[in-house]
Image (spheres, rainbow, N blue to C red):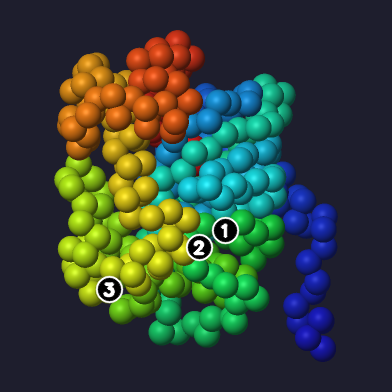
Amino acid sequence: MNSQLKPAVTPSRLQDSREELTAIVERYAQAEGLTPTAWSALSFFRADSPSDRSCAMYEPCLGLLLQGNKHILLGDERFEQENGHYLINSIDVPVSAQVMRASPHEPCLCITLRLDPVRIGEWLSEVKLPKPATATARGLALSPVSTDILDPLLRLARLLDSPRDLPLLAPLIERELIYRLLIGEQGARLAQIATAGGQGQQIARAIQWLKQHYNKPLRIDDLANMVNMSASSLHHHFREITAMSPLQYQKLLRLHEARRMLLTEGCDVATAAHRVGYESPSQFSREYSRQHGAPPLRDVNRLRYAAGEASAVASTY
């Protein structure tokens, strides 16, 4: 009886929906890089060839890879995202990302929906979360897409062709999509950051402070007191969620911001180092080289040659 009420999803239906969504993304994302859409939380990404490793700050988001292959490095942990798999990221994290497979005839195509923790929190009192099969501490994870996720994403993308309907219907589809994510296999991971008083939310507050004060000296005891945790608990749970320590997180923020300054503001290396909080330009250059694969000026010149004056820290989603 239940099977009659809810027919089984066929592979062809899933494939047809993926193909339609891929066609929409390719139609809108004519140029390489990030393409914003008329719905501010929704964006598309296109790459016509494999890329070098690039740095990005991933916000809480759902990111579905429709074509191609990408590698994402979070701390020392590597994620390989194949087409047909979606990424859930529940907290702001600095990552390195690299497009591994793409061509002009079959570009790497992604669709991303930025997620609002407040809207996630609104569902938590109404949704019974499934018990996770594995530990859910890490803020980033990959899963194969299902029709429960794909259908609302496709309906949201279709609305781009209906500007009159978009502002009224898109919020409803977003709400449905968050519900589908919460009752899915990554629901507990997504919910931990929006749970009032939870450790995930405390880590989110610590991250917000680091983002706003990345160029200031960091004392772990002070940061722990600020978010009502012990220093050891902060360090433990911060690493569980982000795959790095608070000091490593701050260093990546500094290096990402310095790269942006060098590329878009034209300042010299010593000035950029000082502005992001380094007292020693030589230490800055060493850490920059380890993170970006080349000394600051050589890296920036390479980026300008490859992509003009485009920002190197634009999200790859």
Residue at the disc numbered 2: 138
- At 24% from the left and 60% from the top, the residue drawn is 220
Find the distance from the CA under tag 3 to the CA under tag 1. 27 Å
Residue type at the position of mark 3: Ser
Name the residue located 42 percent from the left edge and 77 percent from the top edge.
123
Q: Tell me whether the residue at label 1 lies in contact with that at label 2, contact meaning CB atoms closer than 8 angstroms.
A: yes
Judged left or right of residue 64, residue 302 is left
The amino acid sitting under disc 2 is Arg
List the residue tagged with mark 1. Answer: 141
| Residue mark closest to the camera, 3 vs 1 | 3
Name the residue nearer the viewer: 156 or 220. Answer: 220
Q: Is residue 117 visible?
A: no
The x, y position of residue 204, in whole percent, is 33, 63
Q: Is residue 294 above or below residue 80?
A: above
Query: Is label 1 in a helix, a strand or a loop?
Result: strand
Cα separation, mark 2 vs mark 3, equals 20 Å
Residue holding disc 3: 230
Q: Which mark is residue 290?
A: none
Q: Is residue 143 visible?
A: yes
Q: Residue furthest bottom?
A: 1
- Please tell me whether mark 1 or mark 2 is closer to you in this view: 2
Earlier in the chain: of badge 2 and badge 3, it is 2
